[in-house]
Amino acid sequence: LPTVVARAELLLAQHRLARDDGLDEMHSPIGRRFLQQLEDALAGLKAQWRATGSVGEIQVSVVCQRESVAKVMDLLQEVLREPSFPVEEFEIIKRQNKDLLEKSKTEPGALASRLLQRKLDPQPESNIRYIPTVEESMSRLEKTSIEDIRNLYSSTVGVGEAELVAVGDFDPAILQEK
């Protein structure tokens, strides 16, 4: 069947980001239970997507069939505009990040990587590109609350620019209205 491949890139409002908020270790606005529902919905639409991100941007790649484009874009829009931030899932993610940071304290590869990043691109602590030490990351993580995540998300996602590129068999009008 003909497929559609689309990639959306959202550039976040970087001027609103600051590394003194402790949010550098938290990544997912989607709770695990919701994520399973999302994966089930995508499977029902015979679609796949992958979301990745880095400082100041979110990228979402989508592969689906022509007849699923509108519904897949609706799901993408829902996830980005009305994210689920369940407190229980936040605490699980926070605990997992804490465990990873704790392990990285003695892992030579992780220590070397972090040190190399810090030496190659030294930045002041207030800069979003600042690479904190493991101890600084742990301290920031400990201070981070679910409200911090919600506030950061609402002040950065949707207030920057977005770009969508799609190739394949689809009706351009459907993507333009989404």
Image (cartoon, helix red, strand yellow):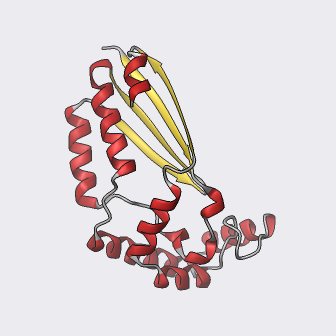
User: Measuring 61% from the left and 70% from the top, which residue is drawn there?
Assistant: 110
Q: Is residue 123 left or right of residue 104?
A: right
User: Measuring 37% from the left and 22% from the top, which residue is drawn there?
Assistant: 174
77 up-or-down from 4: above or below: below
Q: Please state which of residues 170 and 1 is positioned toward the viewer in this rendering.
A: 170
Q: Please state which of residues 109 and 128 is positioned toward the viewer in this rendering.
A: 128
* Quadrant in which the C terminus is drawn: top left
For the image shown, how many numbered marks are present on the structure?
A: 0
User: Measuring 28% from the left and 25% from the top, which residue is drawn there?
Assistant: 68
Q: Is residue 6 left or right of residue 116?
A: left
95 up-or-down from 33: above or below: below
Q: Is residue 3 left or right of residue 26?
A: left
User: Measuring 57% from the left and 48% from the top, which residue is drawn there?
Assistant: 160
Rendered location of residue 109, percent (x, y): 63, 69
| Quarter of image, res 104 | bottom right
Rendered location of residue 1, percent (x, y): 30, 14
Q: Please state which of residues 77 and 102 is positioned toward the viewer in this rendering.
A: 77
| Quarter of image, res 119 | bottom right
Rendered location of residue 14, percent (x, y): 63, 57
86 up-or-down from 1: above or below: below
